[in-house]
Image (cartoon, rainbow, N blue to C red):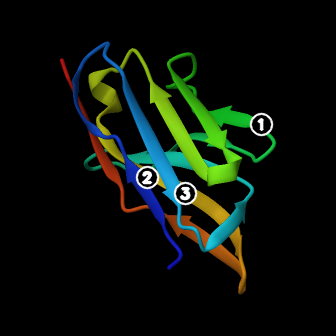
Amino acid sequence: QVQLVESGGGLVQAVGSLRLSCAASRSIFKINTMGWYRQAPGKQRELVATSTRGGNTNYADSVKGRFTISRDNAKNTVYLQMNSLKPEDTAVYYCNAPSGVTEKGFVYDLWGQGTQVTVSS
């Protein structure tokens, strides 16, 4: 089965921290770019951060200096360390991989099921 599985969401007070994880299923043995998006109630899904396999990263301006994306390429896992959380960070966070390689070929536009992050003031 080809999938991304997130974990690590929850409820935290403002200025607290959370760490999200996203692991690709074993059937996906190589992924270049992995990233995190989020969607708050009534808003469009937005980019949070991305990381290439080589370690090039990109962040939304709203999270720069507070969030850190990292990868474990051997495990096809991506992490999002979120510090100094604000109530406006409250959203469902989704893991994404634009493409991946399986033994049957390429797969595209992979999304996790989402994990809720709630930051209380």
User: Tags 2 and 3 in contact by the CB under 8 Å rule?
Assistant: yes
Label 1 SS = loop
| Residue 62 position in % (x across, y down) | 50, 25
Q: CA distance from mark 2 to mark 1?
A: 20 Å
Determine whether 9 is above or below 100 in the image: above
Query: From where the camera sits, is residue 51 visible?
Result: yes
| Residue 40 position in % (x across, y down) | 31, 44
Task: Please tell me which residue is depicted at 50% across the width and 18% down the height of the picture.
Answer: 66
Q: How many marks?
A: 3
* Residue 33 image label: none
Q: Residue furthest right?
A: 54
| Residue 39 position in % (x across, y down) | 37, 48
Among the two numbered marks 2 and 1 on one chain, the one whose residue lies closer to the N terminus:
1
Q: Which quadrant is home to the C terminus?
A: top left
In the rendered structure, which amino acid carries the disc numbered 1? Asn
| 59 on left or right of 31 | left
Among the two numbered marks 3 and 1 on one chain, the one whose residue lies closer to the N terminus:
1
Q: Residue furthest bottom?
A: 104
Q: CA distance from mark 2 to mark 3?
A: 6 Å
Determine whether 83 is above or below 101 in the image: above
* Residue 56 image label: 1
Closest to the observer, 26 or 2: 26
* Residue 94 image label: 2
Q: Which residue position is annotated with label 3?
A: 96
Q: What is the crowding at mark 2: few (fewer than 14 residues within 10 Å), some, or many (at least 20)?
A: many
Label 3 SS = strand
In the rendered structure, which amino acid carries the disc numbered 2? Tyr
In the rendered structure, which amino acid carries the disc numbered 3? Asn
Query: From where the camera sits, is residue 44 visible?
Result: no
Q: CA distance from mark 3 to mark 1?
A: 16 Å
| Residue 13 position in % (x across, y down) | 21, 19
